[in-house]
Amino acid sequence: MAIQLPAGLLSTARYVASPHCDERPTQEVIDMIVVHGISLPPNEFANDCIEAFFRGELDSTAHPYFVTIAHLKVSAHLLIKRTGEMVQFVPFAARAWHAGQSYFQGRERCNDFSIGIELEGTDELPYEPIQYEKLAYVVQLLQQTYPAITRERVVGHADIAPGRKTDPGPSFDWHFLDCLLVR
Protein backbone atom coordinates (compact mmCIF):
# COMPACT_ATOMS: atom_id res chain seq x y z
CA MET A 1 0.00 0.00 0.00
CA ALA A 2 1.34 3.43 -0.97
CA ILE A 3 0.18 6.94 -1.70
CA GLN A 4 0.76 7.74 -5.33
CA LEU A 5 1.98 11.31 -5.74
CA PRO A 6 1.31 13.87 -7.07
CA ALA A 7 -2.23 12.57 -7.57
CA GLY A 8 -2.64 11.71 -3.90
CA LEU A 9 -4.32 8.38 -4.48
CA LEU A 10 -4.03 5.32 -2.24
CA SER A 11 -2.73 2.46 -4.39
CA THR A 12 -4.92 -0.22 -2.78
CA ALA A 13 -8.16 1.75 -2.71
CA ARG A 14 -10.81 1.59 -5.38
CA TYR A 15 -11.17 5.12 -6.78
CA VAL A 16 -14.69 6.47 -7.27
CA ALA A 17 -14.51 10.19 -8.06
CA SER A 18 -16.78 12.54 -6.12
CA PRO A 19 -17.80 15.90 -7.58
CA HIS A 20 -18.01 17.25 -4.02
CA CYS A 21 -14.48 18.58 -3.71
CA ASP A 22 -12.30 21.43 -4.84
CA GLU A 23 -8.78 22.79 -4.51
CA ARG A 24 -7.38 23.59 -1.10
CA PRO A 25 -6.48 27.22 -0.40
CA THR A 26 -3.03 28.13 -1.69
CA GLN A 27 -0.22 27.43 0.76
CA GLU A 28 -2.50 25.41 3.09
CA VAL A 29 -0.58 22.64 4.87
CA ILE A 30 -2.36 19.32 5.37
CA ASP A 31 -1.89 18.69 9.08
CA MET A 32 -4.92 16.80 10.39
CA ILE A 33 -6.98 13.65 9.86
CA VAL A 34 -10.66 13.63 10.80
CA VAL A 35 -12.18 10.21 11.53
CA HIS A 36 -15.88 9.89 10.78
CA GLY A 37 -18.50 7.17 11.11
CA ILE A 38 -21.31 6.69 8.59
CA SER A 39 -24.01 4.18 7.70
CA LEU A 40 -26.73 4.62 5.08
CA PRO A 41 -29.50 4.04 5.74
CA PRO A 42 -28.73 4.55 9.45
CA ASN A 43 -27.53 1.34 11.11
CA GLU A 44 -27.44 -0.58 7.81
CA PHE A 45 -24.26 -1.83 6.16
CA ALA A 46 -22.98 -3.67 3.09
CA ASN A 47 -24.65 -1.64 0.37
CA ASP A 48 -23.61 1.07 -2.09
CA CYS A 49 -25.57 3.93 -0.52
CA ILE A 50 -22.53 5.72 0.92
CA GLU A 51 -20.84 5.68 -2.47
CA ALA A 52 -23.99 7.03 -4.15
CA PHE A 53 -24.24 9.76 -1.49
CA PHE A 54 -20.64 10.91 -1.97
CA ARG A 55 -21.11 10.88 -5.77
CA GLY A 56 -24.27 12.99 -5.49
CA GLU A 57 -26.37 10.13 -6.86
CA LEU A 58 -28.34 9.00 -3.79
CA ASP A 59 -31.88 7.97 -4.75
CA SER A 60 -34.07 9.95 -2.36
CA THR A 61 -36.94 7.48 -2.91
CA ALA A 62 -34.94 4.40 -1.87
CA HIS A 63 -35.38 5.00 1.89
CA PRO A 64 -37.36 7.58 3.91
CA TYR A 65 -34.16 8.92 5.53
CA PHE A 66 -32.62 9.69 2.15
CA VAL A 67 -35.15 12.48 1.52
CA THR A 68 -33.46 14.45 4.32
CA ILE A 69 -29.90 14.13 2.97
CA ALA A 70 -30.00 13.53 -0.82
CA HIS A 71 -29.62 17.27 -1.52
CA LEU A 72 -26.39 17.56 0.49
CA LYS A 73 -23.03 17.89 -1.24
CA VAL A 74 -20.76 15.79 0.95
CA SER A 75 -17.66 13.68 0.40
CA ALA A 76 -14.66 12.24 2.17
CA HIS A 77 -11.22 11.35 0.98
CA LEU A 78 -11.54 7.71 1.97
CA LEU A 79 -14.14 5.19 3.16
CA ILE A 80 -13.12 2.05 5.03
CA LYS A 81 -15.96 -0.44 4.87
CA ARG A 82 -16.66 -3.02 7.58
CA THR A 83 -15.00 -5.66 5.38
CA GLY A 84 -11.80 -3.60 5.19
CA GLU A 85 -12.41 -2.60 1.58
CA MET A 86 -11.23 0.94 0.93
CA VAL A 87 -12.85 3.37 -1.49
CA GLN A 88 -11.25 6.72 -2.26
CA PHE A 89 -13.49 9.57 -3.43
CA VAL A 90 -11.16 12.57 -3.39
CA PRO A 91 -7.39 12.72 -3.91
CA PHE A 92 -5.65 13.58 -0.63
CA ALA A 93 -4.17 16.78 -2.08
CA ALA A 94 -7.67 18.11 -2.88
CA ARG A 95 -10.23 19.44 -0.40
CA ALA A 96 -13.07 17.00 0.35
CA TRP A 97 -16.28 18.35 1.85
CA HIS A 98 -16.41 16.22 5.01
CA ALA A 99 -16.10 18.47 8.06
CA GLY A 100 -18.73 21.13 7.46
CA GLN A 101 -18.77 23.97 9.96
CA SER A 102 -15.77 23.08 12.08
CA TYR A 103 -13.10 24.45 14.40
CA PHE A 104 -9.85 23.05 15.80
CA GLN A 105 -7.14 24.72 17.87
CA GLY A 106 -8.07 28.24 16.83
CA ARG A 107 -8.69 27.46 13.17
CA GLU A 108 -12.01 27.27 11.37
CA ARG A 109 -12.85 25.49 8.10
CA CYS A 110 -11.12 22.19 8.87
CA ASN A 111 -11.75 20.94 5.32
CA ASP A 112 -9.01 23.34 4.24
CA PHE A 113 -6.24 21.50 6.09
CA SER A 114 -7.56 18.02 6.91
CA ILE A 115 -8.09 14.61 5.36
CA GLY A 116 -11.47 12.99 6.03
CA ILE A 117 -11.64 9.24 6.56
CA GLU A 118 -15.06 7.63 6.95
CA LEU A 119 -15.54 4.30 8.68
CA GLU A 120 -18.67 2.37 7.84
CA GLY A 121 -20.36 2.14 11.22
CA THR A 122 -22.42 3.86 13.87
CA ASP A 123 -21.84 5.58 17.19
CA GLU A 124 -23.34 2.62 19.04
CA LEU A 125 -21.87 -0.50 17.40
CA PRO A 126 -18.21 -1.52 17.65
CA TYR A 127 -16.15 -1.03 14.53
CA GLU A 128 -14.47 -4.08 13.00
CA PRO A 129 -10.82 -4.91 13.82
CA ILE A 130 -9.95 -4.85 10.10
CA GLN A 131 -11.19 -1.25 9.95
CA TYR A 132 -8.78 -0.23 12.71
CA GLU A 133 -5.94 -2.08 11.00
CA LYS A 134 -6.57 -0.37 7.66
CA LEU A 135 -7.08 3.00 9.36
CA ALA A 136 -3.80 2.69 11.29
CA TYR A 137 -1.89 1.81 8.16
CA VAL A 138 -3.41 4.69 6.18
CA VAL A 139 -2.72 7.12 9.04
CA GLN A 140 0.94 6.07 9.05
CA LEU A 141 1.20 6.49 5.27
CA LEU A 142 -0.40 9.91 5.49
CA GLN A 143 1.96 10.92 8.30
CA GLN A 144 4.90 9.98 6.08
CA THR A 145 3.45 11.95 3.18
CA TYR A 146 2.25 14.91 5.25
CA PRO A 147 4.65 15.15 8.23
CA ALA A 148 2.62 17.87 10.00
CA ILE A 149 0.00 15.21 10.87
CA THR A 150 0.90 14.16 14.40
CA ARG A 151 -1.07 11.68 16.52
CA GLU A 152 -2.61 14.62 18.39
CA ARG A 153 -3.99 15.82 15.07
CA VAL A 154 -5.88 12.59 14.34
CA VAL A 155 -9.29 13.49 15.70
CA GLY A 156 -12.95 12.56 15.51
CA HIS A 157 -15.62 14.58 13.75
CA ALA A 158 -17.13 15.28 17.18
CA ASP A 159 -13.85 16.95 18.21
CA ILE A 160 -14.08 19.59 15.48
CA ALA A 161 -17.87 20.05 15.48
CA PRO A 162 -18.93 19.53 19.12
CA GLY A 163 -22.66 19.66 19.68
CA ARG A 164 -23.29 19.23 15.97
CA LYS A 165 -21.60 15.86 15.35
CA THR A 166 -20.99 12.78 17.51
CA ASP A 167 -19.03 10.48 15.21
CA PRO A 168 -17.12 8.27 15.24
CA GLY A 169 -18.92 7.88 18.57
CA PRO A 170 -18.32 6.21 21.90
CA SER A 171 -17.97 2.82 20.22
CA PHE A 172 -14.75 3.96 18.51
CA ASP A 173 -11.75 2.58 20.40
CA TRP A 174 -9.07 5.28 20.29
CA HIS A 175 -6.81 3.23 22.57
CA PHE A 176 -6.87 0.29 20.14
CA LEU A 177 -6.00 2.63 17.28
CA ASP A 178 -3.12 4.07 19.32
CA CYS A 179 -1.80 0.55 19.97
CA LEU A 180 -1.82 -0.18 16.24
CA LEU A 181 -0.09 3.11 15.45
CA VAL A 182 2.80 2.26 17.80
CA ARG A 183 3.75 -0.87 15.87
Image: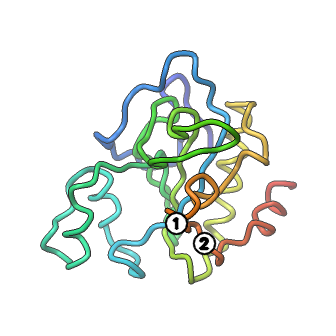
Is mark 1 in CB contact (under 8 Å) with mark 2? yes
Check the image and report above or below for 15 versus 182: above
Q: How many neighbours does mark 1 have within 10 angstroms: few (below 14), some (14-19), or many (20 or more)? A: many
Residue 96 located left or right of residue 136: left
Say which of 21 and 3 sits in front.
Answer: 21
Check the image and report above or below for 140 versus 50: above
Measured from the top left, where is residue 47 in percent x and y? 33, 72
According to the image, label 2 marks what residue? 169
According to the image, label 1 marks what residue? 37
Label 2, secondary structure: give it. loop
Q: Residue at x 17, y 75 (%)?
A: 62
Q: Residue furthest top?
A: 27
Q: Residue at x 38, y 49 (%)?
A: 75
Measure how far apart labels 1 and 2 are at the Cα level.
Answer: 8 Å
User: How are the residues colored?
Assistant: rainbow
Q: Residue at x 23, y 70 (%)?
A: 66
